[in-house]
Image (cartoon, rainbow, N blue to C red):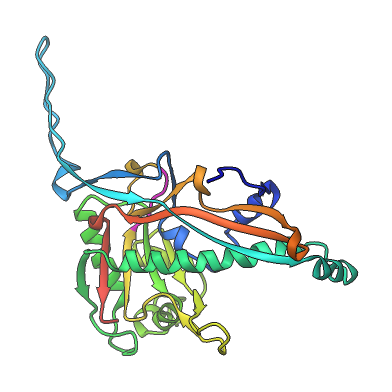
């Protein structure tokens, strides 16, 4: 088996693909990227009784320092490679140039990336909402505009997180239509200008006690190939999450990470090669990652909304 390849790394396309802030995908905001040095391994998971403890002691001259032990469990991760290729026939590229389209390859690569991000978004939704957080029922469903109390429900969740030692970088993670419904319940409308006029998202963040609101609008085409497109919501509309979101090293906290193995594609890599048999350039976009929840104590699930 040959370990050589005719594909060449495309740094310009790769850089462009990794600027993902302009799209509607939120998976990388909820589980930010952490690069890992191995394709598979383990990471530590601390229980609630092993942080924020009053274990420091006054030390007398010449005496030993107070000590504490750390007990933690571990979970396995394995970065899997996901990828797609797009075909750009010479004839199509010539036609694109004639039509004044100078970035046909970039457009194809962007579409390949979007398909990869759909897969990532679905996996993030599954792992995030499948974790065993503390779960609490809402006061009332958002559809009950006069009796729903999302402000108090979220404030209570924030207080519970604070009781577990999570006080910073808290986020409300909520599907878009559910968020819009929340904006129209009496409980929320009453805080804007005293008459329900929506003016500033910061007013809402302050009232809820969170530092950010991650609205999840993503839909994907769930229809079989060749069938009419069916746009399906990725994120649930019957529950939402209040959680600490953190990136980088695990010590920074947060509910989880997208672990990315750079030598195998990292978060996004673009390559291209020539298939002379079909007189086409082949664009390849791939990544290598695993989506993991590292601390269920950092999230509070609100159900029945």
Q: Position of residue 193 (x, y in %)?
A: 47, 76
Which SS type dominates the magenta stretch? Answer: loop
Outermost residue, front side = 1
Residue 227, by quadrant, is bottom right
User: Does 228 sit above or below residue 165?
Assistant: below
User: Does 202 sit above or below residue 183?
Assistant: above
* Left or right: 22 in relation to 48: right
Q: Position of residue 134 (x, y in %)?
A: 19, 65
* Left or right: 74 in relation to 243: left
Q: Position of residue 57 (x, y in %)?
A: 11, 27
Q: Between 48 and 293, which is closer to the camera in this rendering?
A: 293
Q: Between 240 and 114, which is closer to the camera in this rendering?
A: 114
Q: Residue at x 27, y 61 (%)?
A: 299
In this view of the protein, can residue 23 be seen by the observer? no
Span shown in magenta: 244-248
Q: Residue at x 47, y 52 (%)?
A: 288
Q: Between 6 and 45, which is closer to the camera in this rendering?
A: 6
């Amino acid at each position: 088996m040959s370990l050589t390849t005719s594909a060449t790394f495309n740094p310009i396309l790769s850089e462009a693909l990794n600027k993902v802030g302009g799209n509607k995908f939120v998976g990388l905001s909820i589980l930010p990227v952490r690069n890992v040095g191995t394709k598979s391994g383990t990471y530590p998971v601390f229980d609630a009784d092993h942080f924020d403890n009053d274990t420091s002691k006054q030390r007398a001259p010449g005496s030993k320092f107070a000590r504490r032990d750390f007990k933690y469990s571990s979970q396995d991760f394995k970065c899997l490679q996901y990828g797609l290729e797009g075909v750009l026939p010479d004839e199509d590229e010539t036609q694109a140039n004639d039509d004044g389209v100078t970035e046909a390859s970039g457009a194809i690569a962007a579409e390949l990336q979007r398909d990869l991000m759909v897969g990532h978004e679905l996996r993030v939704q599954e792992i995030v909402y499948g974790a065993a957080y503390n779960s609490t029922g809402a006061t009332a469903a958002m559809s009950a505009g006069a009796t729903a109390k999302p402000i108090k429900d979220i404030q209570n969740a924030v207080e519970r997180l604070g009781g577990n030692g999570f006080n910073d970088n808290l986020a409300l993670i909520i599907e878009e239509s559910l968020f819009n419904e929340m904006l129209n319940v009496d409980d929320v409308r009453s805080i804007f200008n005293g008459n329900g006029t929506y003016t500033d998202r910061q007013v809402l963040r302050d009232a809820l006690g969170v530092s950010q609101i991650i609205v999840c609008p993503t839909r994907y085409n769930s229809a079989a190939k060749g069938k009419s497109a069916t746009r399906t919501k990725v994120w649930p509309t019957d529950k939402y999450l209040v959680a600490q979101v953190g990136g980088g090293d695990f010590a920074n906290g947060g509910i989880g990470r997208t672990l990315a193995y750079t030598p195998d594609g990292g978060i996004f890599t673009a390559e291209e090669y020539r298939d002379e048999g079909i007189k086409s350039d082949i664009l390849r976009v791939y990544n290598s990652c695993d989506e993991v929840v590292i601390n269920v104590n950092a999230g509070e699930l609100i159900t029945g909304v």
